Image (cartoon, rainbow, N blue to C red):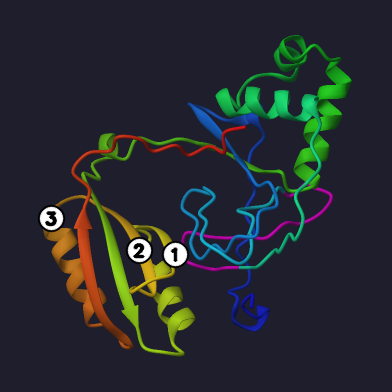
Amino acid sequence: MPPSSSWISPGYSQKLPSPSRLDGPTVVSVALGRNLNIYKVFRHEIVQTAEMLIDNGTMSDWPRERGVHSNAGGIQADTMTTPTALDELDLRILRLLNADARKSYRDIAKEADASLSTVSNRVRKLEEEGVISGYVPVLNEARLGFDVLAVVGVKIHKGKLLEVQRRIAKDDRVTHVYDVTGEWDSIVVVRLRNTRDLDAFIKRLGSMEYVENTYTQVVLNVVKEERRVLL
């Protein structure tokens, strides 16, 4: 069952700039109505496990507010039960934005073989329906000094899953928190500057109330890390 709104942290609505106001490489977060469950969103990237989908941000000028997240771990559920119907033009526009979300509507119209007004209306519609849930720069963590990427399995005391996940998600270095099937109750992905920070993080996590056990895997090499929904 989806989590009750009674435990959701309020006040995390954030403005997301339009492509024309973004600097640097960008990616479009695209939600296609899958039944997924998200407990942590980092830089408004879609993170997914199972049960429901939670969108990753709002624009102040959007006609309809979507689900809202923050790096501080606030969560507001927005469940979509059926996929959004997309035609070939929608898909062409999304592919072009996925390749470069800073691309102008004029360039998109030319490449998609559509009028400027049609492209503008389609993008607005895709935003309103939550298919496009935001525009964000794609940052290189290693260039920013975050050299350690770790995947941590967490076994949590029965009945305390959401409470513990919310506490874990408040750490800004945690990029993803998943509900998973199998031996471990939750999977946590964390970006850290060095192994000393990793050691401190694991010890703090292991001492957290209701955390029964953990295991840690350090990523040695990233073969593929796709942040877009490929269409």
Residue 123 coordinates in the image, percent (x, y) = 78, 32
> 51 or 117, which lies in front?
51
User: In the drawing, does residue 52 fall left or right of residue 91?
Assistant: left
Q: Residues within 10 Å of mark 2 (few under 14, many from 20)?
A: many
Q: Which residue is drawn at 39% across and 75% down?
A: 185
Amino acid type of the residue tagged 1 in the rendering: Tyr
Mark 3 vs mark 1: which is more N-terminal? 1
- What is the secondary structure assignment of the residue under circle 1? strand
Residue 30 coordinates in the image, percent (x, y) = 63, 42
The residue carrying mark 3 is 195
Question: Magenta-highlighted stretch: main secondary structure?
Answer: loop
Furthest-front residue in view? 182
Q: What stretch is highlighted in magenta?
A: 60-75
Q: Do the residues labelled 1 and 2 touch (CB within 8 Å)?
A: yes
The numbered mark at residue 178 is: 1
User: In the drawing, does residue 45 fall left or right of residue 223?
Assistant: right
Amino acid type of the residue tagged 2 in the rendering: Val
Residue 44 coordinates in the image, percent (x, y) = 54, 49
Q: Which residue is drawn at 32% across and 78% down?
A: 155
- What is the secondary structure assignment of the residue under circle 3? helix
- Residue mark closest to the camera, 2 vs 3: 2
Mark 1 vs mark 2: which is more N-terminal? 1
Q: Residues within 10 Å of mark 1 (few under 14, many from 20)?
A: many
The residue carrying mark 2 is 188
Quadrant location of residue 21? Answer: top right
Q: Residue at x 18, y 60 (%)?
A: 198
Q: Do the residues labelled 2 and 3 touch (CB within 8 Å)?
A: no
Amino acid type of the residue tagged 3 in the rendering: Thr
CA gap, disc 2 to disc 3? 16 Å
Q: Are marks 3 and 1 in contact (CB under 8 Å)?
A: no
**Image quadrant where one finds the N terminus:** bottom right
> 83 or 151, which lies in front?
83
